[in-house]
Image (tube, rainbow, N blue to C red):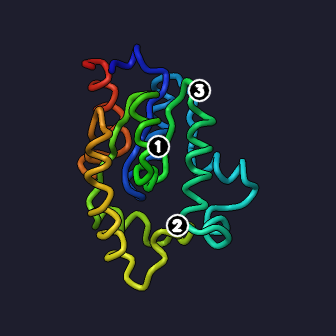
């Protein structure tokens, strides 16, 4: 799928891979709006993600995530998704059929460093945060790879470098 064929660019990858940071810069370069799906979920539900997890668990959050994803499918935008969006088969199908999917990869050490002081991520509330990140990554990595049209290792580039690399790859698609 080429950039011209896709009004939507979805960024997928583990937490701490840079989806929101890279996404904002990429949207600017491409002159597209930027949508952070987690922010969309918070806005639509009038509560933060930890509160949704507390009240409804992961399954309740995943339902809200799918609803939020469906709500942006008519938008021409760069859309940063949450790290776990790929665990739902319906979401995989929605992503694959409604835009170009860019997988921003980051190894677990980098994820750990980038999320060390972030307490707004219920999926890594654990005594051993690094082990939790490893477990999540082991489960989700094949799904990110399966859905990706383009893969970028965000540990190899700074934000500007990631955006330039993505733009170059989009021009070749």
Apparent side of residue 93 relative to residue 142 in the rendered image (left or right):
right
**Could you say where residue 132 lies in the image, as x and y percent from the top left?**
36, 74
Identify the residue shown where x is 30% and y is 38%. 148
Q: Nearer the viewer, residue 29 or 145?
A: 145
**Could you say where residue 53 lies in the image, as x and y percent from the top left?**
60, 68
**Residue that mark 2 sits on:** 121
Identify the residue at the far front of this view: 89
**Residue that mark 1 sits on:** 90
Check the image and report above or below for 172 versus 23.
above
> For numbered disc 3, what is the local secondary structure?
loop
Which mark is nearer the camera, 2 or 1? 1
**Could you say where residue 11 lies in the image, as x and y percent from the top left?**
42, 40
- Is mark 3 in CB contact (under 8 Å) with mark 2? no
Q: CA distance from mark 2 to mark 1?
A: 23 Å
Q: Earlier in the sequence, mark 3 or mark 2?
A: 3
**Residue that mark 3 sits on:** 75
Check the image and report above or below for 132 versus 167.
below
- Choose top left, top right, bottom left or bottom right for residue 161: top left
Which mark is nearer the camera, 1 or 3? 1
């Amino acid at each position: 799928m080429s950039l011209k064929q896709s009004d939507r660019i979805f960024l997928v990858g583990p937490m701490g891979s840079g989806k929101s940071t890279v996404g904002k810069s990429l949207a600017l370069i491409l002159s597209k709006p930027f949508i952070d799906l987690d922010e969309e979920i918070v806005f639509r539900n009038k509560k933060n993600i930890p509160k949704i997890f507390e009240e409804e668990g992961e399954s309740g959050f995943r339902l809200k995530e799918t609803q939020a994803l469906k709500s942006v499918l008519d938008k021409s935008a760069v859309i940063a998704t949450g790290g776990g969006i790929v665990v739902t088969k319906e979401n995989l199908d929605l992503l694959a059929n409604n835009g170009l999917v860019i997988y921003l990869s980051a190894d677990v050490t980098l994820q750990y460093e980038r999320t060390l002081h972030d307490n707004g991520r219920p999926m890594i509330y654990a005594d051993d945060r690094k082990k939790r990140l490893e477990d999540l990554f082991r489960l989700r990595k094949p799904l990110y790879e399966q859905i990706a049209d383009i893969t970028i290792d965000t540990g190899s580039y700074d934000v500007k470098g990631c955006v330039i690399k993505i733009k170059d790859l989009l021009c070749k698609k």
